[in-house]
Amino acid sequence: MEKTLVILAAGMGSRFGGLKQIEPVGPSGEIIADYSVYDALQCGFTKVVFVIKEENLAYFKDHITNKYASKIKVAFAFQSLADVKDKVSPTRVKMLGTAHALYCAKDVVNEPFVMINADDFYGRDSYLKASQFIEHSQDPYEYLAVNYPYINSTSKNGKVNRGVVSLKGDVITDIEECSIEEVKGKIYATSKNTGEVQEINPTDPVSMNFLVFKPTIFTFLQNDLAAFLKTPITDTAELILTDTIKHCLQNKQITFRSITSDARWFGMTYREDIVDLKETLQELIREGVYPEKLWEE
């Protein structure tokens, strides 16, 4: 069975201050996506698709994917504003969001797949759980979120955005994109849609965009994108993948299961986050999880 890893890598990190997807974090200059592809390979994945800006294609081929092109199938999809330029302001630079980014992969993905962010480190356990789900799930409308306890997904350098998950057993009933901060020992999640504030616990599951989909997701994305483009679109308005998932849940079109990963998540929301990530990678190398040089023959 072909298992595909889709990596969203078209966005610029405004808070981080640069193209954080290609920031070296490993001892031999590896980027986070190198470790994502390596972990996926260890768990039986056979293909990787990068969603990028087309102007970055040569760089990705020359400096990133050539290291493992002989070990896994590599494909690219391009996110741009070209196909919607008559719908957005001519001054707009920002991409249309994660739902649009994933939709751009529709022509190169025809099998169950995992979708992740290029600038997030998810850990081996998450890929193993996703691989097992793909092997056993037969329902084309059954998806999976590999979630993390909030405490395993924090940044000590500021607020973070997380999908706060509501569960009934192992089934997700709702997911709310929130800005989360800790104040005087308590954790507050503020909905980015409604502004509603709720207190959450350190062990509550949050979504870090490690999501397992079937190709049926592309029809839902297409419908939401069409509706989005009929509305007035500001220079910063985005179509967020979480919103499409919420629509599907509300309309009872999918079953969205949840499983909690044992791994420690690391991201690069802020430049200072690199320090913790590099230290963790060194620990994992000492433990034998990764080799010193990831793609050495």
Image (tube, grey):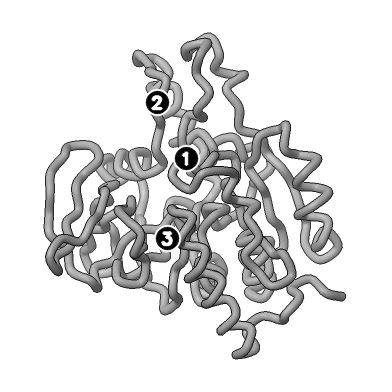
Q: Dot 3: few (<14), some (14–19), or many (≥20) neighbours within 10 Å? A: many
Q: Nearer the viewer, residue 277 or 151?
A: 277
Instruction: Write down the residue under mark 3.
Output: 144
Residue at 14 percent of width and 69 percent of height = 185
Residue at 20 percent of width and 61 percent of height = 182
Relative image position of residue 271 (x, y in whole percent): 49, 55
The three-letter code of the residue at mark 3 reads Leu
Calculate the distance from the C-alpha at mark 2 to the C-alpha at mark 1.
13 Å
Quarter of the picture containing the N terminus is: bottom right
Calculate the distance from the C-alpha at mark 3 to the C-alpha at mark 2.
29 Å
Are circles 3 and 1 on residues that touch, CB within 8 Å?
Answer: no
Q: Dot 2: few (<14), some (14–19), or many (≥20) neighbours within 10 Å? A: few
The three-letter code of the residue at mark 1 reads Ser
Q: Nearer the viewer, residue 55 or 112?
A: 55
In the rendered view, tell whether residue 89 sits above or below residue 225.
above
Circle 2 — which element? loop
Quarter of the picture containing the C terminus is: bottom right
Instruction: Write down the residue under mark 2.
Output: 236
Q: Nearer the viewer, mark 3 or mark 1?
A: 1
Residue at 62 percent of width and 89 percent of height = 286
Of mark 3 and mark 2, the one earlier in the sequence is 3
The three-letter code of the residue at mark 2 reads Thr
Of mark 3 and mark 1, the one earlier in the sequence is 1
Are circles 3 and 2 on residues that touch, CB within 8 Å?
Answer: no
Relative image position of residue 190 (x, y in whole percent): 19, 47
Instruction: Write down the residue under mark 1.
Output: 14
* Quarter location, residue 247: top left
Residue 211 makes an appearance in the image: no
Of mark 2 and mark 1, the one earlier in the sequence is 1
Residue at 51 percent of width and 13 percent of height = 91
Residue 187 left/right relative to 233: left
